[in-house]
Image (cartoon, rainbow, N blue to C red):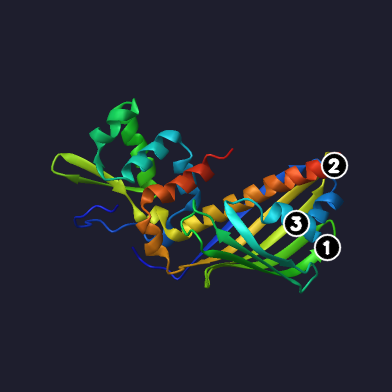
């Protein structure tokens, strides 16, 4: 869940979070893996990189995309850069929207099945 | 995080079916057919399905959310009002979703049926207003992991 500690930087205003950008950011499996791990707890960049089998530089690049999309926030404390999930990119409303889309997608899959059955019965 | 009372979202889904627009339209117009594709599955039990397919007519579907959902046992109700119907061409409807007795969204949905050489292209446009349902904190209790599961699954779809 959310990490304790002060939030030094204001998050992006929610309404400015671009849904397309969020979807693009999550379209990549490595970035999804990053988000999934950060959803458990905040991690330093190097800890984050460890199990990913990609270079630190590549992880940093993925993090930049995730930061731009408002999904992840990073903060340098001393010499360590810590990453954590950002609420702005994952507001409940956005979740509802993506879920709604998924519901309709599944409906239209079933419609296709139904039409195929009717055609050949 | 700054709290909002409403968020607007639009999405478009396009599908091609190897059937005539008449057949595809019939799957929207015929309650027996519509029930089979519209309200099945989703890991939930359908408890009500009533539809009156005419301009000005209403439709009501109530499902009970299954154990794998964030709100097991809670009723999910869809209230639809048919705004425009042009046979084999278009259906426009407004629908409201309720979670329990709370309204969570109101949308204007447009279904267009475009005749093609191979059958029908269906274009579905959903323009929605999503309300802060008051369940936000409850959703978050479930943990980000759970939230993300559904989202990543959806995003992984081809």
Q: Residue at x 46, y 56 (%)?
A: B70
Q: Residue at x 63, y 48 (%)?
A: A105
Asked if badge 2 and badge 3 are on a common chain, one would say no
Q: Looking at this view, name the residue that lies furthest to the left.
A: A78
Asked if badge 1 and badge 2 are on a common chain, one would say no
Distance in Å between CA atoms under marks 1 and 3? 17 Å
SS for dot 3: helix
Foreground of the two, A61 or B85: B85
Look at mark 2 in the image and give the residue it sits on: A119
Q: Does the image show residue B97?
A: yes
In the rendering, which numbered label is found on residue B86? 1
SS for dot 2: helix
Left or right, residue B97 beside residue B23? left
Q: Would you place residue A90 above or below residue A36 in this image?
A: below
Where is residue B11 drawn, in percent x and y? 60, 54
Quadrant for the C terminus of chain B in the image: top right
Distance in Å between CA atoms under marks 1 and 2? 23 Å
Quadrant for the N terminus of chain B in the image: bottom left
Left or right, residue A88 beside residue B8? left
Q: Residue at x 21, y 41 (%)?
A: A81
Left or right, residue B136 beside residue A79? right
In the rendering, which numbered label is found on residue B15? none
Q: Residue at x 74, y 43 (%)?
A: A113
Foreground of the two, B109 or B71: B71
In the rendering, which numbered label is found on residue B34? 3
């Amino acid at each position: 869940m959310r990490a304790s500690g002060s939030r030094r930087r204001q998050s992006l205003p929610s309404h400015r979070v671009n849904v397309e950008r969020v979807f693009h950011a999550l379209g990549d499996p490595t970035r999804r893996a990053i988000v999934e791990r950060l959803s458990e707890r905040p991690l330093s960049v190097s800890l984050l990189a460890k199990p990913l089998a990609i270079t630190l530089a590549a992880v940093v690049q993925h993090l930049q995309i995730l930061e731009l999309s408002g999904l992840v926030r990073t903060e340098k404390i001393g010499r360590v850069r810590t990453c954590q999930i950002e609420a702005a990119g994952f507001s409940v409303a956005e979740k509802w929207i993506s879920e709604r889309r998924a519901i309709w997608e599944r409906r239209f899959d079933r419609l296709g099945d139904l039409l195929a059955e009717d055609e050949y019965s | 995080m700054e709290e909002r009372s409403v968020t607007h979202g639009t999405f478009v889904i396009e599908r091609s079916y190897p059937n005539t627009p008449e057949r595809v339209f019939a799957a929207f117009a015929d309650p027996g057919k519509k029930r089979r594709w519209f309200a099945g599955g989703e890991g939930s039990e359908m408890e009500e399905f009533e539809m009156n397919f005419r301009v000005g007519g209403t439709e009501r579907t109530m499902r009970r959310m299954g154990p794998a959902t964030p709100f097991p046992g809670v009723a999910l109700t869809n209230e639809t009002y048919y705004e425009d119907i042009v046979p084999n061409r278009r259906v426009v409807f407004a629908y409201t979703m309720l979670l329990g007795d709370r309204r969570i969204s109101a949308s204007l949905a447009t279904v267009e049926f475009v005749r093609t050489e191979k059958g029908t292209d269906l274009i579905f446009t959903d323009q929605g207003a999503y309300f802060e349902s008051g369940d936000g904190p409850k959703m978050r209790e479930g943990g980000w992991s759970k939230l993300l599961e559904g989202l990543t699954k959806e995003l992984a779809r081809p």
